[in-house]
Image (tube, grey):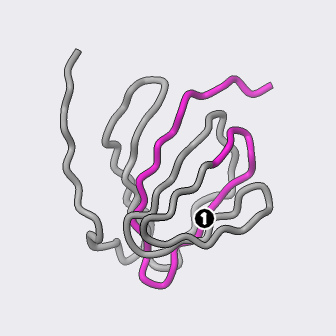
Amino acid sequence: MTIEATRFSGGGPRPETGLDIKMLVDGGAYDVRRVLAAPGERHGPGRHGGDACVCVLAGSVRFEVGGAGHELGPGDILWVPADVLRGFEAGPAGAELLAVHLPRRCLS
């Protein structure tokens, strides 16, 4: 087993447009990603077969999960259950997120 440490900094520059997604850990059944979102950038809506935990490192974001809105800022954490419609929009200064995607289940 190889164990690696990854360093990333909070408050990094956001892209002018789009999303910058960097895989930090790929554990096979799970992964950890850093997401940088430009101001007003949208992602989703969509469904995923596994749960996710999202932490806002910098900026702000509005998540829609199962029809409910959640305004999040630095230090806020959101649990997103599997198979629920979800999406987000970055705030006026963009957003930096840490997303942990847990084991995927088969969708039937």
In the orientation shown, which residue stands out farthest toward the bottom?
Answer: 92
Q: Is 11 on the left or on the right of 31, as rendered?
A: left
At x 77% / y 64%, what residue is drawn?
68
Quadrant including the N terminus: top left
Residue 25: image location, x then y, percent: 33, 36
- What residue is shown with label 1? 88
Q: Is 69 on the left or on the right of 62, as rendered?
A: right
Residue 41: image location, x then y, percent: 52, 72
Please tell me whether the stretch drawn in magenta is mainly helix, strand or loop.
strand
Residue 85: image location, x then y, percent: 74, 51
In the orientation shown, which residue stands out farthest toward the top?
Answer: 1
Quadrant including the C terminus: top right
Vertical relation: 16 (above or below) 24: below
The verdict on residue 74 being magenta is no
Q: Is 43 on the left or on the right of 30, as rendered?
A: right
The picture quadrant where one finds residue 44 is bottom right
**Does dot 1 land on a helix, a strand or a loop?**
strand
Residue 4: image location, x then y, percent: 19, 32
Vertical relation: 19 (above or below) 14: above
* Observer-nearest of 13 and 16: 13
The verdict on residue 96 being magenta is yes
**In the image, which residues are magenta?**
80-108
At x 68% / y 50%, what residue is drawn?
46
Please name the amino acid that badge 1 sits on.
Answer: Phe
